[in-house]
Image (cartoon, grey):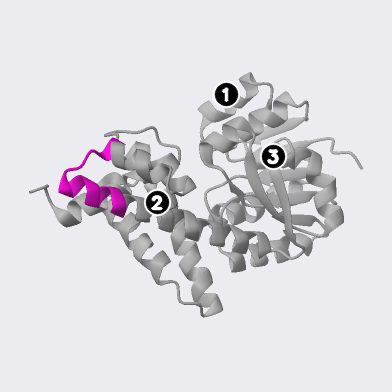
Amino acid sequence: MALSRIAFVGLGAMGMPMARHLAAAGFDLRGYDIRAESRAALAAAGGGKAETVRQAAADADAILLMVVNASQAEDVLFAKGALEALTPDATVVLMATCPPQAVVDIAARVTATGRRFIDAPVSGGVVGAEAATLTIMAAAPADVLAHLRPVLDRLGDKVFHVGTEPGQGATVKAVNQLLCGVHIAATAEALSLAERVGVDLAVVLEILSGSSASSWMLRDRGPRMLEDEPRVTSAVDIFVKDLGIVLEAGRGAKAALPLASLSHQLFLSTSGRGEGALDDSQVVRAYRALNGPRP
């Protein structure tokens, strides 16, 4: 059955370009965000505007949630009435990064109404959202995923079917974020050492980027660590949240995650100094705070 109408909730730094891609592809899309200016911006880009979550979801065949966390997803679906406003056989696609157990609980409430659910967190940040090159980690029965595949293919160039049960996508995303957070923190530690001993950071970064010590995060975040005020593509507070989810998943599995825990503390300390809205590369400032001025 073709998708005749889609609702999209969460028109933030990533959600807005994602919704615009769907509108540009010709989907009958209605978007909602708590900010009136975001709703107006989507309407100007060809999407439909809704003044409430319930209006956005009314008679939609699918709703995509690009909200901040599981609490917001629950509020949209259950407290604000989006779920009951959908068509009876609609599909809920949760694309936010959430704890696996929270996703399991939300999915159970959705499917209890006869509707379908896809656990589909994404990776790629603002850059990936703008370029429609997100990596999407989708967990759902194969037929449910196939039904929404035309939508997901407009948002990412890598759509992986990671499992059939809710929570499996969230778990894969947690593993992804564990490595991302640790790699950013490790890059910050290496560059802070180079900075403290007074060597040319640009030269060090060039050497590391072409050596066996390199990583995607070093090549991407490293140059921004050399800038005073880099563009924000993913904020420090994102990793405060996401590494918190990683540690929660580790506790649930009784898995020791010492590197994730230390990395979380570094991001948390950066946020605690009032720098949580800065680009996540600025976790390097945690090392500068620890080490003090260069001798």
Query: What label sits on residue 157 in the rendered view?
Result: 3
- Label 2 and label 1: CA atoms lie apart by 33 Å
Q: How many marks?
A: 3
Q: Nearer the viewer, mark 2 or mark 1?
A: 2
Residue found at the far right of this picture: 1
Residue 119 in view, yes or no: no
Identify which residue is drawn at 67% across, 64% down. Answer: 168
Kind of element beneath mark 3: strand
- Label 3 and label 1: CA atoms lie apart by 25 Å
Residue type pointed to by label 3:
Asp
Measured as percent of width and height from the top left, residue 182 is found at: 42, 58
Identify which residue is drawn at 84% across, 38% down. Answer: 3
Residue type pointed to by label 1:
Ala
The residue identified by callout 1 is 41
- Label 2 and label 3: CA atoms lie apart by 24 Å
Q: Which residues fall within the magenta stretch?
A: 189-202
Measured as percent of width and height from the top left, residue 158 is found at: 69, 44
The residue identified by callout 2 is 184
Identify which residue is drawn at 56% across, 63% down. Answer: 99
Residue type pointed to by label 2:
Ile
